[in-house]
Amino acid sequence: MAFSKDFIWGVAGASYQVEGAWNEDGKGPSIWDTYTHSRQSPVKQHDTGDIACDHYHHMKEDVALLKELGVKAYRFSISWSRVIPDGFGEVNPKGLAFYSDLVDELLANGVEPMITLYHWDLPQAIHDRGGWLNPDIVTWFERYTKIIVDALSDRVKYWITINEPQIFIGLGCYTGVHAPFLKLCDRDVILMSKHVFLAHGHAVRTIREYAKQSSKIGFAPTGPTFIPDNESAEAIEEARKKSFAFNPDGYLFSNSWWADPICLGKFPDGAKEFFGDLIPDFTEEEWSIIRSPLDFYGCNIYNASRDETDIAATDAKNGLVGEPITAINWPITPDALYWSARFFYERYQLPVLITENGCANTDYVFLDGKVHDPQRIDYTTRYLRGYYRASKENIPLVGYIYWSFMDNFEWGIGYSARFGLVHVNYQTQVRTIKDSGYWYRDVIASNGEIIWKE
Ligand code: NOJ
């Protein structure tokens, strides 16, 4: 009962969440730098990513840990403003060198690099020019992609264009709880969506055209998956419908608002009827760029949804009374991985890569010097068992990327949540592999066999 031989076991992180060195070696500020520094920042305890895990200075040590965990792939993101300080002007050679060295170090240690081009840290200078509202962002993103592809594609095969548009537009520009803390109206976020679609599509084309080796390209959306109440055909159909429904109140957080244009070349049913002229025109050429063929459907899945009235709800109010929850109140719903893989594959016909899944826990170093986190081991075991069902049913699966490699800055709730397989002491920057890290190493070594052990 193992996964397929070429199944990719990985872990993930993202630039702003781990790197620190926010203003070193020529890096320009991103919106997360600027707005976490503002007096009005709603981030818990006013935490910032200024230092975070100081991965910028601990890169080699961190790659050694990845090797110790035995992971096959490391998903990391590039800080656009580290490479191009204002996002569209001069390249910062030291910024580019950091990622080139990281890629070399990974490969030297037998770890496949998997690059996310955009994980929310928009260059401030681009935001100052309107950010995702400015149509020029499409060209700027295309140029940035080309610079990264020219520098790294001789060694990098796996590419993820954008991470969770649901969140950087939805929480960043609509509900205002993530930087840049905006609360815009439909018209503006719909225009932003168009620019996100085009930036993604142009990035895909740039990678295909200029990569120095054949590439595997996807994006990493999140979104609600509904689990059927039972396995009758009717219940399954109802869950499927809800998972892709267009809901005027939660559309930015939905699957279909983002993935239907990118994978099917159209808006979800109901969207045009509801928004009318608020949806700008798209030319045929634009649609063909947006739906440039992908190699996998990446998805960040943490739990299933139940509450249809609040499609963005991810916390306990979305669960059943007394249901198990993680340390940040997210319901534990292991079958989410099976139903997500199945529904996404059925609709978009792409092999599935779980680009994120993981458990926040209240981890600390015990008196014996170790970090015991049985909840995370239990959580991941259950989710992987759910995912395995998809493998058994011959749904093509690329792999599973655990979020996260190490504890890090968790956006709106700062350092109060720990998702890592590796514990980070933020005062000393000492890393400690948690029990779950050693367990994951054994999962990988057995290609998943040990998830069946009680
Ligand atoms: C979504 C994001 O991609 C990642 O940055 C975040 O830390 C995790 N999921 C957990 O919330």
Image (cartoon, rainbow, N blue to C red):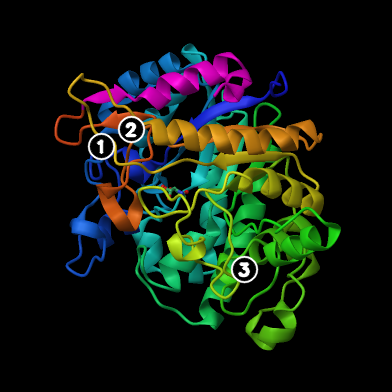
Asked if residue 105 shows in the view, the reply is no
Front residue (pair 157, 154):
157
Label 2 beta carbon within 8 A of ligand 1: no
Report the quarter where the C terminus lies. top right
**Residue 11 as seen in the image, left or right of residue 241:** left
Tag 1 near tag 2, CB within 8 Å? yes
Q: Is residue 72 left or right of residue 43?
A: right
Residue shown at 34% from the left, 44% from the top: 17
- Going by the image, does 161 lie left or right of 260? left
Point out the stretch of residues depicted in magenta: 430-454
Residue where numbered disc 3 is placed: 194
Residue 401 percent coordinates (x, y): 54, 34
Does residue 211 lie above or below 285 as drawn?
above
Q: Secondary structure at mark 3?
A: helix
Name the residue that disc number 2 marks: 94
Mark 1 or 3: the one toward you? 3
